[in-house]
Image (cartoon, rainbow, N blue to C red):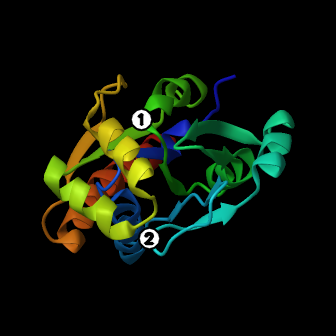
Amino acid sequence: MAIANSDLLVFVVGTSGSGKDSVMRETVSFLHSQNIPAATLKRVITRPSDKNEESTFMTSDEFLQQKANNEYALSWNIYDNWYGCGWAPIKEAISLNKLLLINVSRSMLFKAREVFPECRIILVTVPKEVAESRIKRRGREDDSGLQIRLKRMKSKVEMPTPDKIIENTGDLARTAEILGEFLMDHFLKREGKKS
């Protein structure tokens, strides 16, 4: 089932430690400053959120029950945790004509393009040593969990060609401005086609 107006959805991907959540937050702030309606999707995750992300915690049993009830547009399991992007906030953003930035696993992008064919894909990149340093500073995993995350970070994941690649090593505000201008241009063009 393909969803209409899915060009309002912006899937943001990158390895662990690339700073996706920070870039998304700053980009939404920039878009608001330009009077462009935008938000980030609050994912459901079966681990408590940390200060860098906004998510809803749910137990695995609760998550799998909601998954069985088809409440997630996209869901995946990685690092022994479930992640879900709910249908309700996605449909609400589309109905409000609002850009919605969504942090997803790179492995989910082919599925995302299948369900949301007009979506935009943004790849956030940083050098491996920068990502590794950020992951260690977050302190989310024990040593074995950290090694698993670092190993996956270095592996190649097949994904569709991104619409925009953003390097996130410099000034965060400038990075968000670059991405924000790209999304603003996209939003205004689609509004022009409607009028």
Q: Is residue 156 above or below residue 137?
A: above
How far across and how far down the image is residue 184, in percent?
34, 57
- Position of residue 72 relative to residue 55, above or below, is above
Q: SS at mark 2?
A: loop
Task: Residue type at mark 2: give it.
Answer: Asn
Residue 33 is left or right of residue 62, and the answer is: left
Tell me the residue at 23%/73% (across/down).
Answer: 173
Q: Earlier in the sequence, mark 1 or mark 2?
A: 2
Residue 2 x %, y %? 64, 25
Circle 2 crowding by C-alpha within 10 Å: few under 14, some 14–19, many from 20: few
Judge by depth and name the residue closer to the eye, 176 or 76: 76
User: In front here: 188 or 147?
Assistant: 147
Tag count: 2
Residue that appears at 27% across and 63% down: 134
User: The N terminus lies in which quarter of the figure?
Assistant: top right
Labelled disc at residue 142: none
Is 33 situated left or right of 85 in this image?
left
**Residue 34 to residue 121: above or below:** below
Q: Residue at x 44, y 49 (%)?
A: 145
| Farthest-out residue, front | 143
Question: Would you say 88 lies left or right of 62 here?
Answer: left
- Residue drawn at x 49%, y 39% is 7
| Residue 195 visible in rendering | no
Circle 1: element type: helix
In the rendered image, which quarter is residue 18 located in? bottom left
Is 101 in front, or is 137? 137
Q: Residues within 10 Å of mark 1 (few under 14, many from 20)?
A: many
Q: Which residue is mark 2?
A: 52
Q: CA distance from mark 1 to mark 2?
A: 19 Å
- The dot on residue 106 is 1
Residue 121 shows up from this direction: yes
Question: What x and y, as percent, mark residue 81?
Answer: 61, 47
